[in-house]
Image: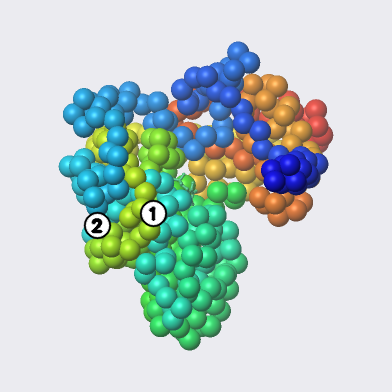
């Protein structure tokens, strides 16, 4: 039987390649950081990691993980509710709630699971989910698994959101669902307006802080800090795979009855293994760090400002950012791809994004800043952008 199926797959894979959409993996042989080593022996400056706070190779987190090996071993070999809950898991859940100013929290293997297991246990076909069109794939999948009526509004567009909320009055309960920071544009969800509309149209609000937690707001509490609405959002989801250390793990936090119901009914929680103690212990240490200092946020915000001003002054077409994601618009798909390839030759690792990840004709280079970057790294990156920009006639002079 496999022969025919194999041929079919080979054909499909070739189509992906022909469309220029095939994904290759670059092999890194060093820890994640501002400077990484690849398996061809080169050292490059990394401007495409979600390592916003530079914690992926942080000594304090590594030490905490090592201590947990000694005290709690390697793995749990159980889901949480059978025999997979340690004192560390409970402590990390408390720390998450403290950080976001919520009542309770529940851990998942990843934020993909947190979002995948969020909607189905809480809402039925009598309810409505009103979702931003640019929400993360895991939210889209989570919504698909739930029988609630679906409404979609244009990205961060409060007028369209209001329109959808009016239509959704037909249902029993409503929830507005949004990413905190949108990963392709670096813009934030207008939480102040969203909460106003939620009040007016009796809707709950859920925000996914994956790209904003640790990053956005003076102390990195995310978009609820940026918009001064801490404690007003009903449900927050997030990841330990980005700013918060970059290893693995996700969470949902919010009102205690919501978290309680998820512990009873959320399928990725009930049917998937508990996070390993070392990852949990490092998460606890990370929150300790976050409550002691805002040094990393200050450095990250200074780096974003420094890069943004320099790349704009160089004459590039840059989207205004409200996060640590800076899209440099190239528009043409092939040019964006060539631009990233040329930058890599100059020792700068960034990714060009094109259709279908972003709309046709809006291809771009996405730069992600980190507290791990020094100004000299950023200077090198800007110099490379200018050199390649001139070579490929993206810059006029
Ligand atoms: C990265 C991301 C996720 C997935 O997080 P994982 O923990 O890696 O599964 C979910 N939502 C958003 C908005 C993200 O950016």
Circle 1 sits in a helix, a strand or a loop, which is it?
A: helix
Q: Give the image's coloring scheme.
A: rainbow
Rendered location of residue 199, percent (x, y): 38, 76
Residue 254 left/right relative to 192: left
Circle 2 sits in a helix, a strand or a loop, which is it?
A: strand
> In front here: 99 or 323?
99
Q: Residue at x 68, y 21 (%)?
A: 346
> In front here: 117 or 363?
117
> Can you identify the residue that label 2 sits on?
104
Q: Nearer the viewer, mark 2 or mark 1?
A: 1
Vertical relation: 189 (above or below) 285: below
Q: Residue at x 48, y 86 (%)?
A: 170
> Can you identify the residue that label 1 sits on?
268
Residue 393 left/right relative to 231: right
Q: Earlier in the sequence, mark 2 or mark 1?
A: 2
> In front here: 34 or 394?
34
- Residue extending farthest to the front is 1
Ligand 1 neighbours mark 2 (CB distance < 8 Å): no
Ligand 1 neighbours mark 1 (CB distance < 8 Å): no
Task: Report the label total.
Answer: 2
Q: Residue at x 55, y 23 (%)?
A: 28
Rendered location of residue 205, percent (x, y): 40, 67
User: Any mark on residue 232, and which?
Assistant: none
């Amino acid at each position: 039987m496999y022969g025919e199926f194999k041929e079919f797959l080979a054909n499909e894979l070739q189509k992906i390649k022909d469309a220029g959409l095939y994904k290759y993996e670059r092999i890194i042989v060093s820890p994640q950081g501002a400077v990484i080593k690849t398996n061809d022996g080169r050292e490059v400056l990394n401007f495409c990691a979600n390592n916003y706070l530079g914690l992926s190779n942080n000594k304090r987190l590594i030490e905490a993980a090592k201590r947990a090996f000694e005290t709690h071993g390697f793995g749990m070999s159980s889901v949480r509710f059978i025999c997979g809950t340690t004192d560390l898991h409970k402590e990390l859940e408390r720390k998450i709630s403290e950080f976001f100013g919520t009542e309770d929290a529940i851990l998942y293997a990843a934020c993909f699971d947190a979002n995948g297991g969020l909607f189905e246990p809480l809402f039925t076909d009598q309810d409505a989910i009103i979702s931003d069109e640019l929400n993360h794939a895991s939210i889209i999948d989570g919504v698909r698994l739930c029988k609630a009526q679906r409404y979609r509004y244009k990205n961060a567009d409060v007028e369209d959101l209001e329109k959808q909320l009016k239509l959704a009055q037909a249902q029993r309960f409503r929830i507005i669902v949004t990413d905190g920071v949108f990963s392709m544009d670096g813009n934030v969800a207008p939480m102040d307006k969203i909460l106003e509309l939620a009040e007016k149209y009796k809707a709950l609000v859920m925000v996914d802080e994956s790209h904003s937690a640790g990053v956005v707001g003076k102390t990195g509490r995310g978009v609820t800090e940026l918009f001064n609405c801490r404690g007003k959002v009903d449900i927050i989801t997030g990841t330990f795979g980005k700013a918060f250390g970059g290893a693995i793990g996700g969470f949902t936090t919010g009102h205690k009855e919501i978290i309680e119901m998820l512990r009873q009914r959320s399928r990725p929680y009930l049917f998937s293994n508990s996070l390993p103690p070392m990852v949990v212990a490092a998460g606890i240490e990370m929150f300790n760090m976050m409550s002691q200092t805002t040094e990393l946020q200050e450095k990250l915000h200074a780096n974003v400002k420094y890069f943004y001003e320099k790349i704009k002054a160089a004459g590039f077409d840059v989207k205004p950012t409200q996060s640590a994601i800076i899209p440099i618009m190239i528009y043409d798909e092939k040019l964006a791809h060539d631009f990233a390839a040329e930058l890599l030759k100059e020792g700068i690792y960034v990714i060009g994004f094109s259709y279908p990840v972003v709309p046709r004709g809006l291809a771009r280079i996405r730069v992600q800043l980190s507290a791990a970057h020094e100004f000299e790294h950023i200077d090198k990156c800007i110099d490379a952008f200018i050199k390649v920009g001139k070579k490929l006639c993206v810059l006029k002079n």
